[in-house]
Amino acid sequence: MDSELARERALDAAERLFYGRGIQTVGMDDIRGASGVSLKRLYQLFPAKEQLVDAYLERRDVRWRQRLSEHVDRHTDPLERITSVFGWLSEWFREPDFRGCAWINAYGELGATSPRVVARVRAHKQAFRQYLTSLVTDAGLPPPLAGQLFLLAEGAMVTAGTEATTTPGEEAARAAGLLLAAYR
């Protein structure tokens, strides 16, 4: 098996297991079993579990932001583009394997012990905030609105994950609508 295929298999397994069960409960032997990649090869690719966690979060970030962007890009009206973020979150919360925000979960598990994971989590959150800022700016609205929308979205993610419910998406969408109306 070539290195790229082994890496993808390992990351597929890591994503499934880390997101589904939690990072600390999953060992490299679990990744080996789920991926079919030998332990020796796993450690050649990722000399430490922290490096595998970092790669998992990085790859998931790219996919997550791409899915969000594709959803938002279906809309042309600048205000609809903003509210569609919350529609996408609601859809995400309804996915059968939804278990909260992978970055918030990783921060909760490893934030006190892994500067590398903290940096990856902060980069993801900063990119999401910047994305919201660009949507707000494109709509001709004041930039502080983006921070408020960011907090609504993040709160919805935490609540949907911890309470295993989809309603935070709709509640955050209604609150975002009220904020947009107030700023217009």
Image (cartoon, helix red, strand yellow):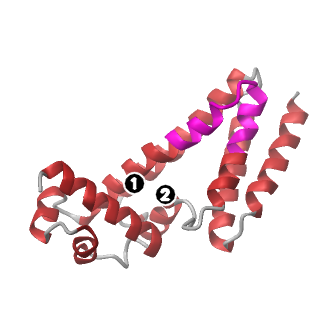
Q: Is residue 64 visible?
A: yes
**How far apart in space, not on screen, are marks 2 and 1 (Cα)?**
7 Å
Image: magenta residue range: 66-86
Query: Which corner quadrant holds the N terminus?
Result: bottom left
Vertical arrangement, residue 73 with respect to residue 17, above or below: above
Amino acid marked by disc 2: Trp
Please say whether residue 126 is visible from this viewpoint.
no
Residue at numbered disc 2: 103
Q: Position of residue 55 (x, y in %)?
A: 31, 53
Query: 10 Å neighbourhood of mark 1: few (<14), some, or many (≥20)?
Result: many
In contact (CB < 8 Å): disc 2 and disc 1? yes
**Residue corresponding to mark 1:** 57
* Displayed quadrant of residue 93: bottom right
User: Where residue 63 sits in the image (x, y, percent)?
Assistant: 45, 45
What quarter of the picture does the C terminus occupy? top right
Residue at coordinates 85% horizontally, 49% vertically from top-left? 174
Say what amino acid the circle numbered 1 marks.
Answer: Leu
Give x and y (percent) for residue 128: 56, 41
- Residue at 28% in and 62% down: 50
- Dot 2: element: helix
Q: Nearer the viewer, residue 74 or 18?
A: 74
